Image: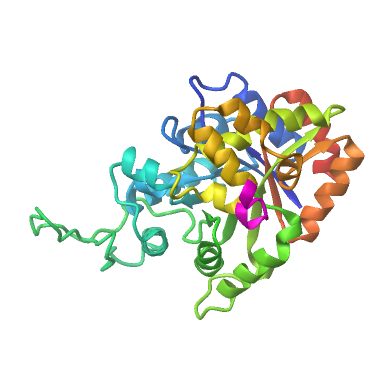
Amino acid sequence: MKFGLQLGYWGAQPPANAGELVVAAEETGFDAVFAAESWGSDAFTPLAWWGSSTERVRLGTSVAQMSARTPAAAAMHALTLDHLSGGRAVLGLGVSGPQVVEGWYGQPFAQPLRRTREYVDIVRKVLAREAPVTSDGKHYGLPYTGPAATGLGKPLKPIVHPLRADLPIWLGAEGPKNVAQTAEIADGWLAIYYAPRLAGMYNEWLDEGFVRPGARRSRDDFEIAASAQVVITDDPAGEIERMRWVSALYIGGMGAPELNFHAQVYKRMGYAAEVDEISALFQAGRKAEAAAAVPDELITDTAIFGDEAHVRSRLKEWEDAGVTMMLISVSDAEQMRRLQPLVTM
């Protein structure tokens, strides 16, 4: 099983030690470094900046939000990064949620599955560079023929010859239909809040996609990157306490009350009553109470805290469940050094 470093997205300021962590990840044996975006920092620039100090690790977006840029623009970002890095780019894409898509990007959120399929299809056409790119899709028609169109739009091929026509595209997906489509059209799945005890359920979703006509991959060559907090520590209780606040935020605040994909993930794990309580408290502004309502088991289902022996044992559970990469955040170089024996095991 491989390891990836998740830089995430920035808070109020850029992280002070991200460059150091990226270099340490390569030296430690990590396979990849990923950056994310929400409504502040973007996912591509940190990879180009900090990734320039590396030679081996793959550089991926986890995730680039599809509504932030057109499919052609995403393909331009990816092919540029791929050339600059010598063929190390991974384009991780996700639909985000309606609050961000409609509130920040000013785009409609409807039909996320269909939008994803059209988006990926156009990106692949750009990277293939076999013909001028056209699309008769409902969401991303090329050339544009909708309201206020001049009628002068011209199908084009990228000026730059992409380094790799098969540049890998991974998709962030949380629900059963989205995961199945990911297995059908993508090269990998960026799984958030992955719980190994539910591997049977995830595998059913994935297998539905793998058996579809024209599926791009099979289980043998499909990557599953599970985002998880993995910390070697003598104080696992302290890490759990820290994660209560993060869990409460994502369950209660990172999505509309009517449609929160993160909350739905935890409900599928069997925490429906707990999720409803956490959400109600968080949305009422009672954030400390929301955090206190997060049970330990909800956190430890999707995270690993403990001494090296415990972490090593739990990582084996993820690997046995089919995960090919642990995508983890690391706070500092010391934690990176503690992880090295596990990365190279």
Q: How is the image coloured?
A: rainbow
Depth check: give the residue in front, 171 or 234.
Answer: 234
**In the rendered image, is residue 8 in sight?**
no
Q: Is 312 a magenta residue? A: no
Magenta stretch bounds:
267-273
- Tell me which corner region of the image, top left, top right, bottom left or bottom right, holds residue 86: top right
Q: Is residue 317 left or right of residue 85?
A: right
Expressed as whole percent of the image width and height from the top left, the position of residue 338 reads 83, 31
Q: Is residue 220 above or below residue 18?
A: below
Q: Is 272 a magenta residue? A: yes
* Residue at the far bottom in the pictured view: 213
Q: Is residue 95 left or right of residue 277?
A: left
Expressed as whole percent of the image width and height from the top left, the position of residue 103 reads 33, 39
- Residue in the image at 7% along x and 55% along y: 150
Q: Is residue 134 left or right of residue 291?
A: left
- Residue in the image at 56% along x and 67% along y: 183
Q: Is residue 244 left or right of residue 249?
A: right
Expressed as whole percent of the image width and height from the top left, the position of residue 281 reads 55, 34
Expressed as whole percent of the image width and height from the top left, the position of residue 85 reads 53, 42
- Tell me which corner region of the image, top left, top right, bottom left or bottom right, holds residue 134: bottom left
- Residue in the image at 38% along x and 47% along y: 98
**How many numbered circles does the render carry?**
0
